[in-house]
Image (cartoon, helix red, strand yellow):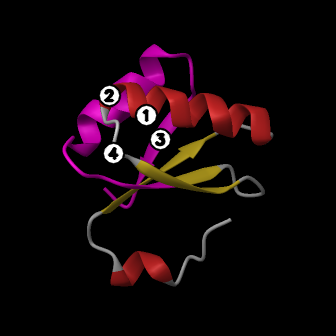
Amino acid sequence: MFLREHYAEEDDMVRFRISNMTCGGCAKGVTATLREVDPAAKPRFDLERREVAVEQASVDAARLEKALVDAGWVSERLGA
């Protein structure tokens, strides 16, 4: 799980709420989707809130969001 306090400190993070992500297996699927687009992506999950924060290395947030949606994840970018 990640801590929300870290968001203010890490400007290179992008956050998504993924309403159909409900378990660790889903988190693995989300991780796989993100890493297909950006192999260096470092996701941090809060399954209770159904959120993922992604530290990006080389891909913009819009491209990550498109990859999530294309893979069937019901995704909403937070704080955009």
| Residue of label 4 | 40
Q: Secondary structure at mark 2?
A: helix
How far is mark 1 from mark 2, CA to CA? 5 Å
| Residue of label 1 | 34
Residues at circles 4 and 1 in contact by the CB criterion of under 8 Å: no
Q: Secondary structure at mark 1?
A: helix
In the image, residue 56 lies in the stretch drawn in magenta: yes
Q: Secondary structure at mark 4?
A: loop
**Label 2 CA crowd tier, 10 Å (few <14, some 14–19, many 20+):** some
How far is mark 4 from mark 1, CA to CA? 9 Å
Quarter of the image with the N terminus in it:
bottom right
The magenta segment: 53-80
Q: Position of residue 29 (x, y in %)?
A: 62, 28
How far is mark 2 from mark 4, CA to CA? 9 Å
**Label 3 CA crowd tier, 10 Å (few <14, some 14–19, many 20+):** some
Q: Amino acid at mark 3?
A: Glu
Q: Position of residue 3 (x, y in %)?
A: 60, 77
Quarter of the image with the C terminus in it:
bottom left
Indicate left or right for 66 with 18 as reference: left
